[in-house]
Image (cartoon, grey):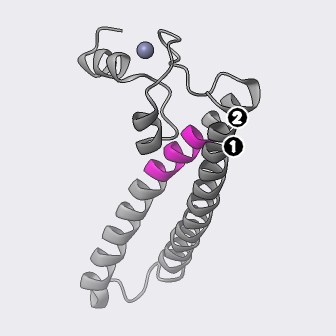
Amino acid sequence: MRKTELQRFRKLLLEEKERVTQSLAQHEKIIMHTDDQSGLETGKAHSNHMADQGSDEFQYETTIKFAKTEGRYLYNIEEALRRIEDGTYGNCQECTRAIALPRLRRLPYTRLCIECKEKEEAGTI
Ligand SMILES: [Zn+2]
């Protein structure tokens, strides 16, 4: 891969990392806030606020689920940045061939070429 191309992906990944990090921090705040509330409410007002409690729990669950997905995404971004540093970025981690540029542009954090990705999804590697 050309160096200018590599720099462009690096910038893209760094920006994405920043965005995801901030989004995760916000979700952590929501999760902690929800924890605080359930602590404060222990033993009182529960029966009066069943509906609120339910929606809080729903929000908590979706937030946690979202945070997990974002966390995995962040990990993938960090791994891609690490590969840029060690010079293996853009090569498939499975067959070591170069990943097609349009695929990288769509998924800059991908570690597999399309063929290996399909094999992985089919469970053959
Ligand atoms: Zn491959």
Q: Which residue is mark 2?
A: 3
Question: Looking at the image, is 125 positioned above or below residue 121?
Answer: above
Picture quarter with ligand 1: top left
Q: Which residues are magenta?
A: 68-77
Question: CB at mark 2 closer than 8 A to ligand 1?
Answer: no
Classed neighbour count for the residue bearing mark 2: other residues with Cα under 10 Å, few (<14), some (14–19), many (≥20): few
Which quarter of the rendered picture does the N terminus lie within? Answer: top right
Question: Observer-nearest residue: 109 or 31?
Answer: 109
User: Any magenta on residue 21?
Assistant: no
Instruction: Give the CA distance from mark 2 to mark 1.
Output: 6 Å
Please name the amino acid that badge 2 sits on: Lys
Q: Quadrant of the C terminus?
A: top left
Q: Residue at x 55, y 66 (%)?
A: 23
Q: Quadrant of residue 25?
A: bottom right
Q: Residue at x 47, y 9 (%)?
A: 95
* Percent x, y of residue 83: 67, 28
- Amino acid carrying label 1: it is Gln
Q: Are marks 2 and 1 in contact (CB under 8 Å)?
A: yes
Disc on res. 118: none
Q: In the drawing, does residue 16 fall left or right of residue 45?
A: right
> Would you say residue 76 sits in the magenta stretch?
yes
Residue 7 circle label: 1
Q: Position of residue 74 (x, y in %)?
A: 57, 47
Q: Position of residue 112 (x, y in %)?
A: 45, 23
